[in-house]
Image (cartoon, rainbow, N blue to C red):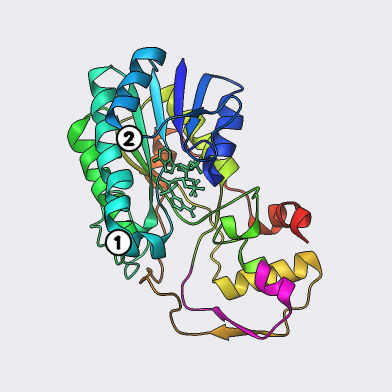
Amino acid sequence: MKVWITGATGLCGRAVTKLLSDSYDVVPTAFSRAEGNIFKVDITSKEDVKAFFEKHNPDAVVHLAAERKPDICENKKDVTDNLNIEATRFLAEQCKQNDCWFLYLSTDYVFDGTKPPYLPTSEPNPLNYYGESKLKGEIETLKANDKAAVLRVPVLYGEVEELGESAVTTIFNLLKKQEEAKVDHWATRFPTLVDDIAKVIAKMLSGKPSGTFHYSGETALTKYETALLMGELMNVSTDKLIAEPNQTGTALRPKNAQLDTASLKAAGFYVEPSEPKDVLAAILRPHL
Ligand SMILES: NC(=O)c1ccc[n+]([C@@H]2O[C@H](COP(=O)([O-])OP(=O)(O)OC[C@H]3O[C@@H](n4cnc5c(N)ncnc54)[C@H](OP(=O)(O)O)[C@@H]3O)[C@@H](O)[C@H]2O)c1
């Protein structure tokens, strides 16, 4: 089976490309960082996307490319719309026309975080433009292609090129500075390892389901609790960090958007999530 992966240079895309390459004929694509065996395809260009389908004729598309930084989405709505909504819609349509399975990776930010845990059927109510654009991407996907699947996941972590690449590993930058800093102790998050998501996607590719699914890590951590865990694992003092009980950041974020994974389990695509305490040290060590 030939699988086109968009966003292959990203945090999630690198893990997905690596794992799927073991079992599938993978064609990874990206944009500014595309090089070597990763093709450059601007997915906001309909001509480029059509040309890619004609040349490679994939059996499945795993669509990971997106603008996913809430503060950028808030300030660059046109760019965000083009990438997160319009390009997604066109890819979903092209997949439908080419009899190709389509998977769209989405986010727990489609929910407002007031009534967790959330089922795939729960009412979305995004609080920021990132969540809104990803929800519109979901709606366009399912409208354009009745055989497509949406997989919602929470905040991601994994092997990073630099600590700021993941909203989880970036916390380690604060510990390294050893300066007084307030750290969010308001929002509960469920950090999810990209290698686990790759395994879920590999399973979904073998079943090609349609509809919306949720996957999530199971360890609940605020950013402050994550910092304490990192301090313990890396033997770095956390004495200068102050737990901040109020919401931080410029874009509004959900307080607790825990995703219920029962339907993914029932469908047989679930994998046991890794625990941050078992994997974080290896991820952070190269960035000490
Ligand atoms: N990160 C999280 O915490 C998180 C949480 C929930 C859901 N998600 C979702 O998971 C997916 C993957 O996220 P991620 O964190 O791995 O993203 P990421 O690291 O920010 O990577 C984004 C990818 O999109 C590609 N891209 C950007 N503009 C493009 C364009 N015009 N044409 C083609 N490719 C383009 C980038 O390519 P270049 O870098 O080569 O330009 C890069 O490979 C996204 O859909 C995101 O919404 C992420």
Give, as a three-letter code, the residue at label 2.
Answer: Ala
How many other residues sit within 10 Å of disc 1, few (<14), some (14-19) or many (≥20)?
A: many
| Distance Cα–Cα, label 2 vs label 1 | 22 Å
User: Ligand 1 near label 1 (Cβ, under 8 Å)?
Assistant: no
The secondary structure type at the circle numbered 1 is helix
The secondary structure type at the circle numbered 2 is strand
Residue at 25% across / 58% down in the picture?
Answer: 124
Earlier in the chain: of badge 2 and badge 1, it is: 1
Give, as a three-letter code, the residue at label 1.
Answer: Tyr
Q: Which residues are magenta?
A: 173-188
Q: Position of residue 275 (x, y in %)?
A: 64, 54
Residue at 44% across / 75% down in the picture?
Answer: 249
- 172 or 78, which lies in front? 78
How many other residues sit within 10 Å of disc 2, few (<14), some (14-19) or many (≥20)?
A: many
Q: Position of residue 17 (x, y in %)?
A: 56, 31
Tell me: 259 left or right of 24: left
Q: Which residue is the site of mark 2? A: 149
Q: Position of residue 207 (x, y in %)?
A: 40, 24
Q: Which mark is residue 129?
A: 1
In the image, farthest residue toward the right: 235
Of the 4 image quadrants, the one containing the C terminus is bottom right
The reply to whether residue 257 is visible in this rendering is no
Res 162 quadrant in image:
bottom right
Q: Is residue 66 above or below residue 60?
A: below
Tell me: 17 left or right of 59: right
Question: How many marks can you see?
Answer: 2
The reply to whether residue 136 is visible in this rendering is yes
Instruction: Judge depth for marks 2 and 1 and give the one in front.
Output: 1
Q: Position of residue 15 (x, y in %)?
A: 59, 38
Residue at 33% across / 64% down in the picture?
Answer: 74
- 15 or 67, which lies in front? 67
